[in-house]
Image: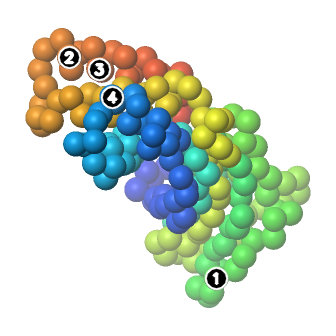
Amino acid sequence: MTSNTASWGVALVTAAGSDALTLDEMRSWLRVDSTVSDADVTALLAAATAMVERDTGQVLLSSTFKLVLDEWPEDQVIRLPRHPVTAVSEIRHRDTTGAWQVLDAATYTLANVRNPARIGLAMGQSWPPVASQIGAIEITFAAGYATAAAVPKNLTMALRLLASHWNENREAVVVGQTNAALEFGYHNLIAGLKMEWIA
């Protein structure tokens, strides 16, 4: 982003309305009986989803985020810290008087083939002056796969692997071959899908 890595942040605005795996799919994979509640299985899936999304920057199902900047990036290119980005719905900024202004969409273009997706200036355009204050720029964007079927299979397998491990090992720390095997399998599953992050 900008030269100051503390000058930006991203927040979830609207979460996906469903999961990449159904409750029945997860129960079948875990091979759990009726003594394990749906709430426990749902909690395992939610925790696994959070970990996979944190470690990869991938958003499993379509959600809305808000990226907040203090200033425009030095290289004039905004990099979005989630993938895959499907749309930018709004960019707004505080002008030099402190009032919010919505930027005309003709000012910028979205390049979302690469990871991370980038927002750049359209030809002949420039970013407007902004107030010298924290959080002067807000970018609202959508990211995530459209359907559960579209989520890469190695990501859904990573969900299964984590949930299985946590279900079978209730202790806070597991040592030995089980933990090593988990780390090897999990990290190999997500390796090719990690974001090309920017310092």
Q: How crowded is mark 1: few (under 14 residues within 10 Å), some or many (20 or more)?
A: some
Write down the residue under mark 2: 178
Marks 3/1: CA–CA distance: 48 Å
Badge 3 vs badge 1, beta-carbon distance below 8 Å: no
Q: Earlier in the sequence, mark 4 or mark 1?
A: 4
Q: Which amino acid does label 1 sit on?
A: Trp
Write down the residue under mark 3: 182
Judged from the image, the secondary structure of the residue bearing numbered disc 2 is helix
Q: Which amino acid does label 2 sit on?
A: Thr
Badge 3 vs badge 4, beta-carbon distance below 8 Å: no
Q: What residue type is labelled 3?
A: Leu
Write down the residue under mark 1: 100
Judged from the image, the secondary structure of the residue bearing numbered disc 4 is loop
Q: Which residue is drawn at 64% across and 74% down?
A: 93
Q: Which of marks 2 and 4 is nearer the N terminus?
A: 4
Q: Which of marks 1 and 2 is nearer the N terminus?
A: 1
Checking the image for residue 159, the label placed there is none
- The image's colouring method is rainbow
**Residue 145 location (% of width, % of height):** 64, 43
Badge 1 vs badge 2, beta-carbon distance below 8 Å: no
In the image: residue 142, left or right of residue 11: right
**Residue 110 location (% of width, % of height):** 76, 49
Q: Can residue 41 be seen in this view?
A: yes
**Residue 156 location (% of width, % of height):** 49, 31
Q: Nearer the viewer, residue 141 or 96?
A: 141
Q: What residue type is labelled 4?
A: Arg
| Above/below status of 105 relative to 150 | below
Badge 2 vs badge 4, beta-carbon distance below 8 Å: no
Q: Nearer the viewer, residue 64 or 27?
A: 27
Q: Residue at x 40, y 28 (%)?
A: 29
Marks 3/4: CA–CA distance: 18 Å
